[in-house]
Amino acid sequence: MSTTALLTGMTGLAANSQNLEVIGNNIANVNTTAFKGSRMLFSTALQRTINIGAKPETTTGGTNPMQIGLGVNVAGTQLDFSQGAFQTTGDGRDLAIDGNGFFAVQRGQDQFYTRAGSFRQDAA
C-alpha cells in the first residue's frame, strides 16, 4: 500500500469525524427552541491528473481528462433555515414567524436576532 493511499484514507476519516460532531450537535439540540440544524460540506483536497484528454478530431469524439482525488477537506458547514413546524404553547405572549425573517430584540445597548418567539414583559 502506498503512503498516498493511506493519507487519502486518513483525510476521509478526519472529515467524517467532524461530520459526526455536526450530526451529534443536531441531535443534541433537536428540541431546542428555534434551533437550526447544520450539514457538513466537503471538497476535494488535491487532484492528480492521470490523462489530460484530447480534443475532438474529424473522425473521433476526443477523450475526457481523468483525475484522481487525493483526499477530502471540510469546506464548511451550512445552516438549514427551512421552516419548522408550529407548536401551540397556550401562552398568548408567544409568537412565531411564518417564512423568512427574525425577531430583533435588545438587551441594554446590544441588538440580537432570534426566531425564538417566547417573549415576556420586564419591569421597563
Image (cartoon, grey):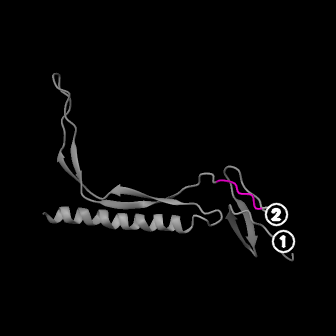
Query: Extreme right residue here?
Result: 124
Q: Residue at x 30, y 62 (%)?
A: 12
Between residues 101 and 30, which one lies in front from this camera angle? 30
Toward which corner of the image does residue 42 lie, by quadrant? bottom left
Q: Is residue 70 magenta?
A: no
Q: Residue at x 65, y 53 (%)?
A: 85
Say what amino acid the circle numbered 1 marks: Gln
Q: Residue at x 64, y 62 (%)?
A: 34
Mark 1, other Cα within 10 Å: few <14 / some 14–19 / many ≥20: few
Which element carries disc 1, helix, strand or loop? Answer: loop
Find residue 89 and report its horizontal and vertical position in percent.
Answer: 76, 62
Between residues 110 and 117, which one lies in front from this camera angle? 117
Q: Circles 2 and 1: CB distance less than 8 Å?
A: yes
Between residues 88 and 24, which one lies in front from this camera angle? 88
Query: Extreme left residue here?
Result: 1
Query: Extreme top residue here?
Result: 58
Q: Quadrant of the N terminus?
A: bottom left
Label 1 belongs to which residue?
121
Lateral position of residue 1 relative to residue 36, left or right: left
Tell me the number on the disc at residue 8. Answer: none
Label 2 belongs to which residue?
93
Find residue 121 and report its horizontal and vertical position in percent.
Answer: 84, 71
* Magenta stretch bounds: 85-89
Lateral position of residue 30 relative to residue 5, left or right: right
Image vertical order of residue 106 relative to residue 81, above or below: below
Q: Residue at x 27, y 59 (%)?
A: 71
Find residue 123 and report its horizontal and vertical position in percent.
Answer: 86, 77
Query: What type of secondary structure mainly makes up the magenta span?
Result: loop
Lateral position of residue 33 relative to residue 118, left or right: left
